């Protein structure tokens, strides 16, 4: 079992719809969870971090964490073509451990 | 406030050669991590430096080595380059906060091509 898994996609949604991106992780000791956005040919950009169970909202983005199910998700409301990118889920146990990235999910927002 | 910077942007090397990549962390950050990202994959952790010492290491051979300087900048060295080392090399820095938060901020990366 891989440490962090994501649906590879591509995930296609129409403009204005909600995009739902999912991530599962294997280490129950994981404490910090991140979503990065990566445009083609660019480096990852941190868009959300979440540390406790529940939802965290920031603008059009909502991160959801369920530690019991070892599941973290990212919802993008009112999706825009500019949201088309690869979304990377990252997990860490403590600040003294390495960050583990998933393979990423490619999102395409169709105008 | 400058973000994380990396140099060079692009590099072309021949098999067997050695390469050095450089990274300057974001102001206020003391921890630097290096990642290798192959096309279509997520970043793979190489190692992390804190207080000029390698604190964590991923599953990379000893051909990959690094260094952190007193000003927190860092270098990644790769010896005896292989074709498979062709990738985007990313540097990420983290702030001093030693709590739960470990938000990493990435530099633009160095695209290494080995021929």
Image (cartoon, coloured by chain):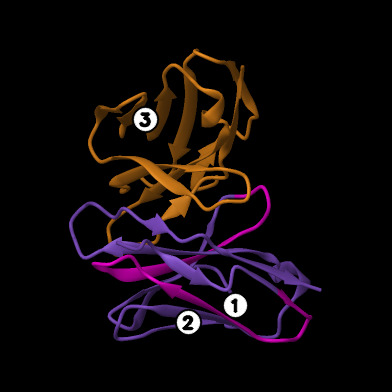
Chain colours: A orange, B purple
Q: Earlier in the sequence, mark 2 or mark 1?
A: 1
Report the residue that reaches farthest toward the right. Answer: B115
Image location of residue A65, percent across then percent down: 32, 31
Q: CA distance from mark 1 to mark 3?
A: 34 Å
Q: CA distance from mark 3 to mark 2?
A: 37 Å
Q: Magenta stretch containing residue B4, yes or no? A: no
Dot 1 crowding, Cα within 10 Å, few <14, some 14–19, many 20+: few
Q: Would you say A64 lies left or right of A45 here? A: left
Q: Is residue A20 above or below residue B108?
A: above
Between residues A21 and B12, which one lies in front from this camera angle? B12
Between residues A29 and A86, which one lies in front from this camera angle? A86
Q: Would you say B37 lies left or right of A100 here? A: right
Q: Would you say B43 lies left or right of A34 here? A: right
Image location of residue A5, percent across then percent down: 53, 40
Badges 1 and 3: C-beta atoms under 8 Å apart?
A: no
Q: Secondary structure at mark 2?
A: strand
If the image is split into quadrants, where does the C terminus of chain A sit? top right
Label placed on residue A109: none
The mark closer to the camera, 3 or 2, is 2
Share a chain, discs 2 and 1? yes
Between residues B66 and A45, which one lies in front from this camera angle? A45
Q: Which residues are magenta?
A: B12-41
Q: Which residue is mark 2?
A: B66
Q: Which residue is mark 1?
A: B61
Q: Is residue A43 above or below residue B84?
A: above
Q: Secondary structure at mark 3?
A: loop
Q: Chain of mark 3?
A: A
Q: Chain of mark 2?
A: B
Q: Which residue is mark 3?
A: A69
Image location of residue A92, percent across then percent down: 35, 52
Q: Is residue B51 above or below residue A48?
A: below
Q: Magenta stretch containing residue B33, yes or no? A: yes
């Amino acid at each position: 079992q891989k440490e962090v898994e994501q649906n590879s996609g591509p995930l296609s949604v129409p403009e204005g719809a909600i995009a739902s991106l999912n991530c599962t992780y294997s280490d129950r000791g994981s404490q910090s969870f991140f979503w990065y956005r990566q445009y083609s040919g660019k480096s990852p950009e941190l868009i959300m971090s979440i540390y406790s169970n529940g939802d965290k909202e920031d603008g059009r983005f909502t991160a959801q964490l369920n530690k019991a199910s070892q599941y973290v998700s990212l919802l993008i409301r009112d999706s825009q073509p500019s949201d088309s990118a690869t979304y990377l889920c990252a997990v860490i146990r403590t600040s003294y451990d390495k960050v583990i990235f998933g393979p990423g999910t490619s999102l395409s927002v169709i105008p | 406030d400058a973000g994380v910077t990396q140099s060079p942007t692009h590099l072309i090397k021949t098999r067997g050669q050695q390469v050095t990549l450089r990274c300057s962390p974001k102001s206020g950050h003391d921890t630097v991590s290096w990642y290798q990202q192959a096309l279509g994959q997520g970043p793979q952790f190489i190692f992390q430096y804190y207080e000029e010492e390698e604190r964590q290491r991923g599953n990379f051979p000893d051909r990959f080595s690094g260094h952190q300087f007193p000003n927190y900048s860092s270098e990644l060295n790769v010896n005896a380059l292989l074709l498979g080392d062709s990738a985007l090399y990313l540097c990420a820095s983290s702030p001093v906060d030693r709590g739960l938060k470990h938000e990493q901020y990435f530099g633009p990366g160095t695209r290494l091509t080995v021929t």
